[in-house]
Image: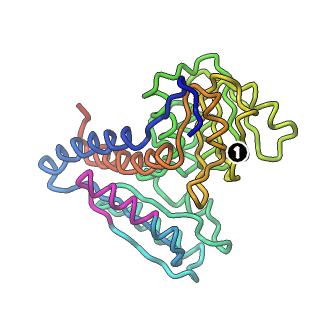
Amino acid sequence: MSATSTVQLMDGTSLAKRIVEEAAARAAEISPRTGTSPCLATVLVGEDPASATYVRMKQARCAKTGSRSRHIGLPATTTTAELIDTLAGLSSDPGVHGILLQHPCGPHIDERAAFEAIAPEKDVDGVTMHSFAAMSFVLPGFVSCTPGGIMRLLEAYDVDLAGKHAVVVGRSAILGNPAGMLLLVMNATVTYSPSRTAGLSAIVREADVVVAAVGRRRLIRGEGVKPGAVVVDAGHDPGNVGDVDFDTASTRTRLITPVPGGVGPMTIAILPAQTVDAAANLLGIQRH
């Protein structure tokens, strides 16, 4: 690493561990009082190896909180209507407190229709329109896990967002868009910049906070980062490469997330934490 002496890494691994431990403590209160444990239902369409790995990782984190997992594997030939029926059934099942639909589901699936079949009170992955609205209007609900993890990182490292210029590179429905809204809620001035934005480098260079969430290897290089900026890299491509060229960017930033060990662990930690919260809400357990 060719970073300056003033750069600080934002350690998502350690913070994620604390979040999971806190969720485990809350889950330990739920079971004796209700006779049940928080339960996350995971739904996977097809047998994509990467998706299956992600599901297992998320189930493992849930286990660390004392939560149960119920996995529903559906064939790759599953239709949108069949997937919606499965999700609707889980939404009405009192033994399930959180639902994760692992995506992508395949080009033949209408993912938005599938997401909307998840009951908002069980949308612990923060993928429904209801959850996006709740994030935007600061109402009770669940945040999208990666943006929620990013905000927890910024909070942990005392990043004051009020009045700062934040540039979000990417506009996906469950990452870029909600990340920008959560930053706006914290009084940042937010610019959304898709990868095709004209003059993207010049826009990023003016940012106090950069959230790279477009899925293009090393799109953002050090010379395109404002000295002293805070850089959050939500990309993760094969070879542990993110959307930011870490070696060059870390010579100019004040705070930066590594890949791996930055945003990734936070994403996986927020899911079980929100599952425990969903269980508490549904079972009528007030948080102390």
**Would you identify the image quadrant in which residue 14 lies?**
top left
Q: Secondary structure at mark 1?
A: loop
Do we see residue 112 in this rendering? yes
**Left or right of 254: which side holds 165?**
right
Q: Tell me, yes or no, whether the highlighted magenta stretch contains residue 82.
A: no
Which residue is at a point 23% across and 47% down the rendered structure image? Answer: 27
Q: Which residue is mark 1?
A: 170
Where does residue 99 sit, x and y in percent of width and height? 42, 59
Which residue is at a point 35% across and 50% down the rendered structure image? Answer: 272
**Left or right of 237: which side holds 57?**
left
Q: In the figure, 209 relative to 198: above or below?
A: above
For this orientation, the residue located farthest to the top is 163
Where does residue 39 sit, x and y in percent of width and height? 30, 58
The quarter in which the N terminus is drawn is: top right
Q: Main secondary structure of the magenta part?
A: helix
- Name the amino acid, label 1: Gly
Q: What are the residue bounds of the magenta stretch? A: 54-69
The quarter in which the C terminus is drawn is: top left
Q: In the figure, 41 relative to 231: above or below?
A: below
For this orientation, the residue located farthest to the left is 32
Where does residue 144 sit, x and y in percent of width and height? 52, 46
